[in-house]
Amino acid sequence: MEKTIKIVIGIFVAVILLSGSFAGGFIVGHLMPSNGLVPFSNEIPTPDTPPTVAPEQQTSTPSELQTLFIPFWQTWTLIHEQYVVQPVDDVKLLEGAINGMLQTLDVGRNYYLNAEQYEQENAVLNGKDYEGIGAYVDTQGDYLTVISPIKDSPAAKAGLRPGDQIIAIDGKDMTGIPPEDARQKVIGPDGTVVVLTILRKDTEVPFDVSITRAKITTPLVESEMRSDGIAYVRLNTFGDTADQELRAALTELLAQNPKGLIFDLRYNGGGYLYQGIAITSEFLPAGQVVVYEKYADGNLEENISTSNGVALDIPMVVLVNEGSASASEIVAGALQDYGRAKLVGAITYGKGSVQSVNMLDNDKGLVAITSAQWLTPKQRLIQDIGLTPDIYVEYTQADFDANLDPQLDAAVETLLAILNNTAIPTSMPMPTPVNTPIP
């Protein structure tokens, strides 16, 4: 049975937690003796008496890798023989070895989750209760970085913004600490407090933010019929039932004969690829390319809209911002490329790498390996570039503090201009160039 599937990575939520989608088959069992233990000894090896590699360790490693793995097993033995605190936790050693391998890979986000972390992330992605600060994060750079706070979460109420780098946690400097390890330090139970030191791109001096963790439930879909006759739908994440919940919301709204539709993908960090395809299929005819996967050899693999959706003809605008990542960018990019919708808001996050996610045997977690990059139907690269909206509108801290939403206002104005066949609102000056097709 094939145990590897592809997902859209971009969302990670750190309970803060990640996003994720999961499946299996990574060579790990070969790294450990069958009993998970090695002999202990009080003897301190010298250069003339190197640590021995137990026969069961040597034979458990594939023959073609036995010489290569001698230093690994020597180190394993040395830790068990010499480390000052015994007994050593073999599970932590093994997980550390897996993480160490993945951290040597330079392209994309490559990561390991143990069984408990996997369960937490599934809860977040699918809108179940979990405890934490409530923010999607990126663990790919030098520091743990906020993609977007979840609506009404402690992170949102504390004022965290997309792009905020967490450079210290509870006063401990995170320089040189793998961002995934930092993410684990942010996780904690309801009611506990964590102090994050934030480096913000438009702020010269880092500052501390104290956040009380809470139990968080994030609905996948929120919708309403506005008093102006415009249907509004917000998709918070691309969880397992996002397509069903979106279709139900659209069906209910369309029965009320709205003038048009605003589809809000702001602060949506992404999720499952198949959900990105299914969501796009509600707005595009069957058989359209939704997104390409571009591999190292240049091959392009098509992902096609799957069925005729319920909202193929209604005039629509899509709201995006710097917190729209991954699956959100796939959907928004396809709708923009086909002229199905205007994008209003800010330049998106730029999270467009493909992860092949592999479930490890015996419920030992998962490993995700970057295998390709996403391209829009017009073959625009998403990774590190993002999507440039048709109407660029900033949403400032002053707007937030005053409970204003100029991006939503611009989306309404744009939709009304489309409906009335009048001039589209003028975009604000954009901070970066519009992305272009790649060769």
Image (cartoon, rainbow, N blue to C red):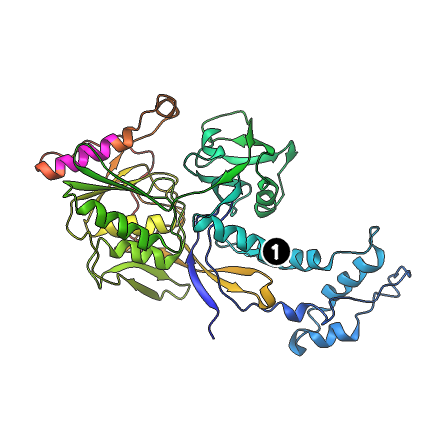
- The residue located at (19%, 49%) in the rendering is 340
- The residue located at (42%, 43%) in the rendering is 218
For numbered disc 1, what is the local secondary structure?
A: helix
* Viewer-side residue, 275 vs 103: 275
Q: Is residue 429 above or below residue 189?
A: above
Residue 280: image location, x then y, percent? 27, 54
Residue 352: image location, x then y, percent? 39, 52
Q: How many marks?
A: 1
Q: Amino acid at mark 1?
A: Asn
Q: Quadrant of residue 79?
A: bottom right
Q: Is residue 120 above or below residue 372?
A: above
| Residue of label 1 | 99
**Which span of residues is magenta-colored?**
409-417
Determine if residue 303 is in view.
yes
Mark 1: few/some/many CA within 10 Å (<14, 14-19, 20+): some
Please give left or right for residue 138 compared with residue 193 in the image. left
* Viewer-side residue, 190 vs 311: 190
Q: Quadrant of residue 171?
A: top right
Q: Is residue 63 above or below residue 305?
A: below
- The residue located at (31%, 58%) in the rendering is 277
- The residue located at (74%, 70%) in the rendering is 35
Residue 403: image location, x then y, percent? 34, 24
Determine if residue 15 is in view.
no
Q: Quadrant of the C terminus?
A: bottom left
* Viewer-side residue, 209 vs 125: 125
Q: Quadrant of residue 274?
A: bottom left
Query: Which residue lies most toward the right here?
Result: 43
Residue 238: image location, x then y, percent? 38, 51
Q: Main secondary structure of the magenta part?
A: helix
